[in-house]
Image (cartoon, rainbow, N blue to C red):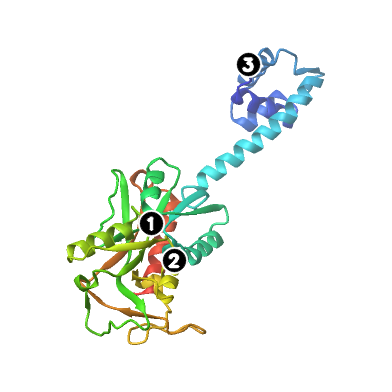
Amino acid sequence: MIAWDRLRVFRAVAEHGSVGAAAAALHITGPAVTQQLRKLEREAGTRLVEPDGRGIRLTAAGHVLAGHAAVAATAVADAERDLAALHDDAAGPLRIGSVASALRSLLPEVLHALTTRNPRLVPTVDDGEVVDLLPALRSRDLDAVLLESWTQRPARLPAGVRVTALVTEPAQLAVPAEDPLTGPDPVPLRTLTGRVWASGPTGTEPYEALLQLLRGAGAEPDIRYRVGDFATQLALVRAGLAVALLPAMAVAGLAVPGGTGPVPAGDDDGVRLLPCRPAVGRSLLLATRESDAGLPSVRALVDGLRAAAARLGPS
């Protein structure tokens, strides 16, 4: 096997044309250069240099090896540069898992800013649920997870995970526009026995939070529509098929007669948002591994998400 140290010495000999000049460039002695050349020839199994007057010249094998030595030297220099840059710059892959509403509301702006500032950063994003994303973080298939934690269903985090709180927001009861429920007083959830609900898939954080919330209020839920997308849950409410408990971020911009929030162009009055009792809240958190806290890519993502969350409003 050819050792890099000896290949580096041989490259200097090939570049400078003599043992003395190579020794001066490498800041070592001439005999040390000669010793390395002899060892390299034994490793290569052939003569690499031959006498040429008072100097030396490369053999045919020496010319071949010199070309490879130049390529290897470039690769090593590039590796040293890239590794040094990791101490200051975000670079390389950044694998992110996210619940859908956080992905839509927070990540696009943040990732655009990060990749503009750090062109060697390569983010990828997987949409999913907390129940699947956290194990992927722990197994190192993901580097960061944007997850949700509900008042009635705090996220259960594995050991070795660091959490950064980003946004805490209220959840509201979404009902069809023609529903007899009215505001502004909060709707007691215990009065909703017999209602059909839309929520997340069975076992997800929104589903389990709704289950615990309603049972705690004395109402057994009838959750017939189990879909992960809040927009689809909203469509089911608008169609008069169900009611739903939705976080503010999921319904931002919805027309809310008798409620709160801006009205988007073209939206109708098919849904009303009402406060409920007991009050419900959802937090968005960023989970990363403790061992990765010092990585520039992770630090840049944390800082970017904090700034974006601050622009959404106070937590």
Which residue type carries mark 2? Leu
Q: Is residue 95 positioned above or below 224 on the image?
A: above
Q: Name the residue under label 1.
A: 201
Q: What is the spatial separation of the Cα atoms under label 1 and label 3, in whole angstroms?
A: 70 Å
Residue that appears at 28% across and 43% down: 159
Residue 186 location, quadrant: bottom left
The crowding category of the residue bearing disc 1, from other C-alpha atoms within 10 Å (few below 14, some 14 to 19, many at least 20), is some
Q: In which quarter of the image is the N terminus?
A: top right
Which residue type carries mark 3? Gln
Which residue type carries mark 1? Pro
Please report whichever mark, 1 or 2, sits nearer to the chain's N-terminal start: 2
Q: In which quarter of the image is the C terminus?
A: bottom left
Is residue 59 among what the camera can see?
A: no
Q: Nearer the viewer, mark 1 or mark 3?
A: 1
Q: Mark 2 points at which residue?
A: 106
Residue that appears at 26% across and 77% down: 275
